[in-house]
Structure formats: structure tokens, C-alpha cells
Image (tube, coloured by chain):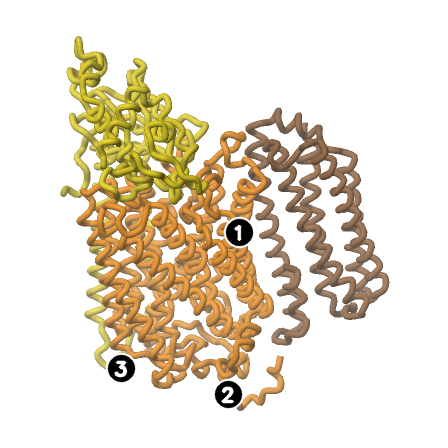
Chain colours: A yellow, B orange, C brown
Amino acid sequence: MTWIPEVASNLAGKVDGVLLTITLLSLFFFVLITVILVVFAVKYRRKRDDEETPYITGSEPLEIIWTVIPSILLIALFVYGFVVYKEMRTPPADSVDITVTGKQWLWTFDYYNGKKTLNELYVEQNRPVRLVMMSDDVLHSFFVPGFRVKQDVLPGRYVQLWFTPTKIGTFDIFCAEYCGTGHSVMLGKVNVLSPEAYDIWENGLPGEGGGAVASLPPAELGEKIYKEKGCNACHSVDGSTLVGPSFKGVFGHTVELADGSNVDADENYLRQSILEPQSQVVKGFQPVMPSFKGILSDDEVTAVIAYIKTLK
Amino acid sequence: MANHTIAHDVYVPFLEKKGFLSWILTTDHKRIGILYLVSTSLFFLVAGIIALLMRFELLTPASDFVDPHTYNVLFTLHGSIMVFFFIVPGLAASFGNFLIPLMIGARDVAFPKLNIASYWIYLLGTAILLMALLKPADTGWTFYTPYSATTNTDVVLMTFGVFVLGFSSILTGLNFIVTTHKMRAPGMTWHRLPLFIWASYATAVLQLLATPVVGITLLLLITERTLGVGFFDPAKGGDPILFQNFFWFYSHPAVYIMIIPAMGVISEIIPVFSRKPIFGYKAIAYSSLGIAAISFLVWAHHMFTSGISETAAMIFSFLTFLVAIPTAIKVFNWIATLYKGSIQLHSAMLYALGFIFLFTIGGLTGVFLGALAADIHLHDTYFVVAHMHYVMIGGTVMGFFGALHFWYPKWFGKMFNETVAKIAWFFIFVGFNVTFFPQFFLGIQGMPRRYATYPAEFESLMSLSTYGSWILGFGILIMVINLISGLINGPKAPANPYNSLSLEWQIPSPPPHENFEEIPQVTDWTYGYGKKKELEV
Amino acid sequence: MAEAGIDQSHDHHMDPATEYSSSKLGMWLFLGTEILLFGGLFAAYAIFHARYPEMFYEQHLELNRTMGAINTCVLIFSSLTMAMGVSAIKWGRQKTAAILILITIICGFIFGVIKYFEYSAKFSHHIYPDTSIFFSLYFLMTGLHMIHVFIGLGILGVIFVLTLKGKFNSKYNTPIELGGLYWHLVDLIWIYLFPLLYLIG
């Protein structure tokens, strides 16, 4: 493991420069202080109880030296930090805008061409991206360690963030501002594609047009959706309890709801739980699941139900 | 008061009277100090155990010990209890109460009844907190809106408990300020005051200025939940960031309410065990006030990623760097005090030296977070968690433990086992570093804070941190056992075991009921150790 | 609070002069924290007024200026009688002081009654603290002030009884003076609240 994530954006190297400078200066002062501390503690250790010590009460030159030198260094660091920050806050004019919405506990991304993705952000290598972000509920924070960018996402107000991805690959998105029970599963990925791959993602291969997806058997398509749309953040398939109940063995069994009533977990129950989650909260769980109305099509909901049925 | 009926030649230690009422109705500042010491220490242990549970959950990436909601409740309780019930009143109220009158040569604080009333208010606050435990909040100790306004846990009771505690804090601070102004013994000029008094004074000023603001902020949050007021709710035209501004306007100075008394303790311990005058007395004294002043102007450095304007970020970053300077000055002066001293590594001194070492790390890592570009990456990651704990445990708690070991003989009239104390120090020091040093690396790698579960790539450092917490917990356990067994069967303490020149050591251990038979006449400062040059001539 | 002063009467660990100056210093510090407590609300007022000036103008018309103005006069008058009460006790006139304190207390009650009518009028028009930001501020600021009026009345009530019992004289009258300071603060805060809420625009 390296000490800092791989540099994957134009800004990351600059932030690392600031971090490295402060680290080196801090190390210098830390070693200086520690060495003097240990040397004094050992060298002047009491040998006899009646040792004489000098009456030294201070030294003005020393006070001035150790006030002025750190002050100069600190001001220099301040300026360095601010200059890089200023650049991090100023997106170039030719950047691509993507709208980001954070809600408990997932990210949705709306692209200029009408495409919409969940928890997976697709961007093109070496092309500046500006994210315009807003929250649907509480505070979140959009954080990509590999890019060294972070911005709190607020309800009722747009905030922005920009970067130019420089490396092809997949990078973590974390929610960095505490947002409730599912805070630690509000994870996403940035997929940085080469210009060619991005073009294919953007326009689709000729003849693909979703055909490849449609040809999957429903249960397999459901599994794919389960992983891609973030269901797996809260629902396990092995019986363990995460934020929400496990999918394992739920179909065909009786479920006790928070209001004390019992329902049979049939297809309609599952469908309603996906589209209107607050209407039937399972006993022992928080009413926190977002609705997937408008995010999943009818076919996709059917596919997810088909997948859940396979989990006995 | 019965003070005039006691014959002056009869020594009655203040601990003599027994019985519950003699404690809960006392107006003796030393007894009130013990009440705070016992209550805050209990909260420290409770919140510490909660921390061990959290670290146990974090041993593995999955959520296998407690569910995420429980984990969120645990870190909320850990933070709230540690901050509001232990660290803020810990050193300031317990040692402040015990030491301020003794050190300035007074028989008590200015308003003894107000003093015990403050403690009752503290108890009331704790009672409210206990009620809140039926459905404890899961907001984090910072109570950020809008989450705190919408979660269905009991935020109202918890914030109300903190609000009530605030009154206790305000009244204690007020009492200490008036005491320092009006009750000093003849000859105890401002520039002869022990540095602990300067530190307590600066702390009291902060308590008075900052606490009312958090009081009104929490009150607003309560009305938000109960009356439907919308100051922090964007749907009603409010602004969630306003809450952060208000909250940190208090809570950043509160960080210094927590650390400055510990700095005062260090300034007392080091000269005694070096047999040297404190180096740069005025620099240390005034830097406390300097820190107190600047601390009001740095609150928004908690909000660099929250969407504040670039100008605001620039100003607050600059002021944050400024606050580093008086802090650095203190560290340099403490080290210079050691120069050519006759250093005795008593357990209290070990805590003081440990403080300098750990606090230096805490301070230097603060520079990372003050620098805007670096903070963007590090904000809300484990780097912040580590930095905060290096300042709060490495600083305040080390100072608290140092003070406990240093004034223990004076306070209780008993001695603890010094060898065991050193062993405990060793485990605490090592355990602390193993717990929190890896967290700097976790933060740099991007591990966000307040995560109940985490990606597998962080597992090795996370579990190392958990192992460290066990060592730290073991060390604290040894320390507690050692200090308690000292109370039960420790040898009797002499009046002045370290040959200190400070006033509190010139009277018997434990001090008599009214401290001083005669109010002392002060002729010199408290740091007159070592051989004066002019005497040689 | 004000018992900071009352506290000291039987605690002879200070000479009377120090005791007097300590109590006064303590009280002033406490009043400072009270102003800071309201300061949070004033800050919120400033921020939201700058953001929604029209809303503040339109909605403040709903408030009853006449009642607000009467209340302002009542409080200013009560401050005057309180100040006279403090002077009276310094000259040793216990009866006069007691009467003046009683008038102050009555004024406080009148203030409360008028405020009660104002609040009921608002509620009958379906105006509540959650109606808008302006009314949130209105209810919180005047409500918090009202709580302070009640606390002040409690303190003055105790002082009134003690004055009647002859506990205070020209030499020892710190509690009256401190109680008076507290009452002036309550008055002062209202003097800021009245124009900010009733007379904007």
C-alpha cells in the first residue's frame, strides 16, 4: 500500500505538492523538538538531590527568533495552500457539466445528453469535468481520494466541483459528510474511460441499443442491477443484516412490518417495496430506503424480483 | 460558616467530614473540585469504554459486532460525553476549583454558593443526558442540520442536556474570573501568578464568551424540531450552513477551553521537576490570552469544503495559521525550561513530557488542515480524527493525568505507587500512538470518518488501530487501579513532596478547611528555582 | 444569575468592599453572557433580514405597533422606578424603596398581560412560530425576552419581600442594585427588539 492514493487528476499532483511540503517542514520541526526534548531529559537528568541549577528566566532574542521564523514559514504555507485551492475552485470554461444529486444513500448522475446513472460516474480521460451538485435531503460530501477533491453537497443550493481525470481506471467515491444510518455504504465509482471507450459509452455501439442487456435472462439481469444500482449497499444476499433486510429467503415468506401487521412477500410486495419503500417498512429497520420510481423501469423491477426469487 | 469558631492551631483537613450531605451541600471549593473530578472521571471511563466498543466494531470491514445505526449512536455518545461532560468541565472545573484559591492565596472562590449551584446544574445536565439514552441521538456530537432536525432519535433531550451544562460552564467561568480579580493574596500581582492561573483565566473568559452562543444555537435546533422553526431548513427559507457557523463559533473556542488548562498544568509541572524557573513567563502567559482571542476568529476552518466563499476561506485559513504561533511559542518555552535543569522523571513529569511530544504532533498536523488545498483532501477523513485525538488525548488528557499525579498528594494526603504509575504511563503512551498514528495514514489514503463499515483496503491499518486501543485501555486501567489503591492504602503524603515554591504546597496535605491559617503575604513569583546570579556577586 | 450577589450576605470570607465590587463584577459579566445569548438571535435576524427584506417588511405590518409602543413605555417607566428604588435604599429609605420595587413588579406584569393579548391575537390569525422565518424570529426573540421578564419578576419579588423585612439599608443593598441591573438589561433588550420587529421599513 502506498502512503497516498495514486495521482489520477490534474489537481492531485498539486495537492500532493502542498502535502509533501508541509510534511517535510513538520518532520523537520518534529525531529528537532523531539531530539532536543530527549537530549535534555537525558543529559540534565538529576544525579544528586542537591544539584545547583542556574536561574534563567527567559531570553528575548530567543523569543523573537522562535516567533518570527515559524511565522514566516506559516505564512508561506498559507499562501501556497491558498494558491492551489484557488485553482481547485476555478473550473475551465470548456468543462463538461454533469449534475450530481446526493440522497440517502446514493448518488445519481445526470449527463448533458439525457443519460442518467446511479452510483457510477462516467467521465472521459483528459477532459475537464464540472460537477454541479445538490442534495435531496441532508448534507453529503462528494469525495474522490484519487482526485484529491471534496465538496459538501447541500440541500436547496447548487455547489460545484471540477477536475480533469488523467488516468484511465475506476476510482472510489466516498460520502465524507455524515448523513445517517447508511453513511458508510453511500459509495460510488468514477469510471475514467479513454476517449474511444467514452464515445462508445456515450452513443452506444451500433446495433447494441440495450439489446445486449435485454437478452440476459431476467434473474441475471436482476443480479446485474442489484450490483450496479446500489441495492447491495443495504441488502445482503447471504442472510446477514446490513442497513436493510437481507434478500436471502425473503420471497414467499411472511414478513412482520413495523406497524405490527404481517404481509406475504409476494411479487407485488417486492414491487411496492422497491417503488414506495416507506409504505411497508419491515419491523426492526429504519424507514430510510429511497424510492426507485423513475430510476428502474418496469422491466428492471421485474428482473430484480426474479433475482430475489432465486435467493432461497 | 463555622470558620471563626475553629481554633487556629487545630488542623482539620478538608476531607475530614463524612456523609453524603456534607458533600452535596458543601461550598468548599476543594470538595466541589472532588465532585467534579469524580463525575468527569466517570464520564471519561464510560465514553472510553464506548470508544473501545467502536474500535472493536472497526476491527473488520463488515458490520459484524453492532449494526450501523448502533455504531452511529455509539460515536455520537462517545463524542458528546467526552466533549461536553468530560473535557470541557474536566480540568477547568475540577482542578480549577481545587487550585485557583490555593494558588492565589485565598480561602475560597468569590461565590462559593454559586459554585456548588454550578455543580448541581452540571448534575441536572447529566440527568437529562441519561434520560436521552432511551433513544439516543445518532447525529454525531456536532448535531449538524438538517440531519439533526430530521432524524427520529431523541436529539431534543440530548441537546437540552448540553444546553443546561452550558449554564454550569458559564457560572463556573464567571466565578473564576471574579476570584482571580478580587481574591488574590496581598503581593500576588498579575505577573507573579502561577501560569495555571493565567491559563484558567483565559479559559474562563472563553467559557463566558462562547458558551452563550452554543446555548442559543442548540435552543434554535430544539425549536426547529419542536415548533417547526426553519432557520436551518432550506425548505423554509433557512440555511443549514448557518448552524455550522453558529456551532463552530462556540465549538472552536471550546477546543481551547479544553486545551489551555492542560497547558497551564504543564507550565506548573516542568519547572518543579527541572528545578528551574519557567522560561519566558510572560510569553507563555500572554500567549494563552492570544490563543483565546484568535480562537474566536477561526471557526470557519471547519467548513472549508462546505461551500463558503473563497474570500472567507482565505481569511479563515490565514487566521488559523496565526493561532499556531502562540502555540508554538509555548512548546519552545517549555523545552527551554529543561535546559541545564536538574530533571527528575517523576510520573507527572513523564506525562508533561509526553504532552509536549504528542501535542507537537497534534499541532503540526493542524497545519495540514489549516492549509486550504490540503484540507480539501483531508477534511472529514481519519486524518482529522487522528489530529483531534492527538490534541485532545495527547494534549488535554495527558495534562489531566499529569495533574492527577502531580497534585494527588496535596489533594488526598496520600501517595500512590510511583513505579506502577510509570508502567501505566508507558502503556498509555505506546497504546495511544499505536491507536492514532495509523489514522493519519488512513486519512491521507481517503478513509472518511464516521464509517460503520469500510472498504477492505483499509483493514490492516484499521485493525492495528484497534489493537492499539486495547493497549491504551489496559494502561488506563492500571493507572486507575494504582490511583484508587493509593487512596486506600497509600502512605501518608508530606506537605511538600517535590519542594515546590507554589503556595498550595506550603500548607498541609490535604489542605485544612479554610486553606490558610493566615492569608499569606506574597513577595516573589512561584518559579524562583535555581541559583540567582546576582546572589553570587 | 442574580443570586451571585445574594450569595455573599453570610459568607464573610471577604471584606464588605471587596464583596460589593466582586458581586458587581460578577453581575456585569453575567449580563454580558446574556447579551451574547441574544446576540445569536440578533445575528440570525441580521442574516435573514438581509436575505428577505421584503418578507420582513410585509410581515412586520401584522404586528400591533400600538401595543408594542405601550409595552416599551411600560418597561422604560419600570426601569425608572427601579433606578429610583436603588437610590432610595442608598439613602436608607426602606419603605420608599419597597414601594418603588413593587411598582416595577406591577409594570412587569402589565407588560406580560399586554404580550399575552398580542400572542393570542397572532394565534387567532393562525400565525405561529413556524409560519415564516420572520415570525419564527418574532416569537423566539420576544419569547426568550418574556422568559427573562419572568425571571426578573421572580428576583424582584424576592428582593421586595426582603426589603419589606428590612434586610437592606444604606450600607448593605447589593442585591437590590444587582436585581436592578438585571431589570435594566431586560429593558435594554426590549428597546432593541421593539424597533427591529415592529418598526422596520
For the residue pair B421 and B363, the one nearer the viewer reads as B421
Q: Position of residue C18 (x, y in %)?
A: 63, 69
- Residue for point 46% across, 82% down: B507
The type of residue carrying mark 2 is Tyr
Measure the C-alpha gap from mark 3 to mark 1: 54 Å
**Residue picked out by circle 1:** B160
**Residue picked out by circle 2:** B11
Measure the C-alpha gap from mark 1 to mark 2: 44 Å
The number of callouts visible is 3
For the residue pair B6 and B457, the one nearer the viewer reads as B457
**Residue picked out by circle 3:** A49
Mark 3 residue element: loop
Instruction: Tell me whether circle 3 and circle 2 mark residues in contact (CB < 8 Å).
Output: no
Q: Position of residue A106 (x, y in %)?
A: 33, 31
Determine crowd level at label 2: few under 14, some 14-19, many 20+ residues with C-alpha closer than 10 A.
few
Q: Quadrant of the N terminus of chain C?
A: bottom right
The type of residue carrying mark 1 is Phe
- Residue for point 44% across, 48% down: B137
Instruction: Point out which mark residue A308 bears.
Output: none
Q: Nearer the viewer, mark 3 or mark 1?
A: 1
Instruction: Tell me whether circle 3 and circle 1 mark residues in contact (CB < 8 Å).
Output: no
Say if labels 1 and 2 share a chain: yes
Instruction: Tell me whether circle 1 and circle 2 mark residues in contact (CB < 8 Å).
Output: no
Q: Position of residue C23 (x, y in %)?
A: 64, 64
The type of residue carrying mark 3 is Asp
Determine crowd level at label 1: few under 14, some 14-19, many 20+ residues with C-alpha closer than 10 A.
many
Instruction: Name the chain letter of the residue that bears numbered label 2.
Output: B
Instruction: Name the chain letter of the residue that bears numbered label 3.
Output: A
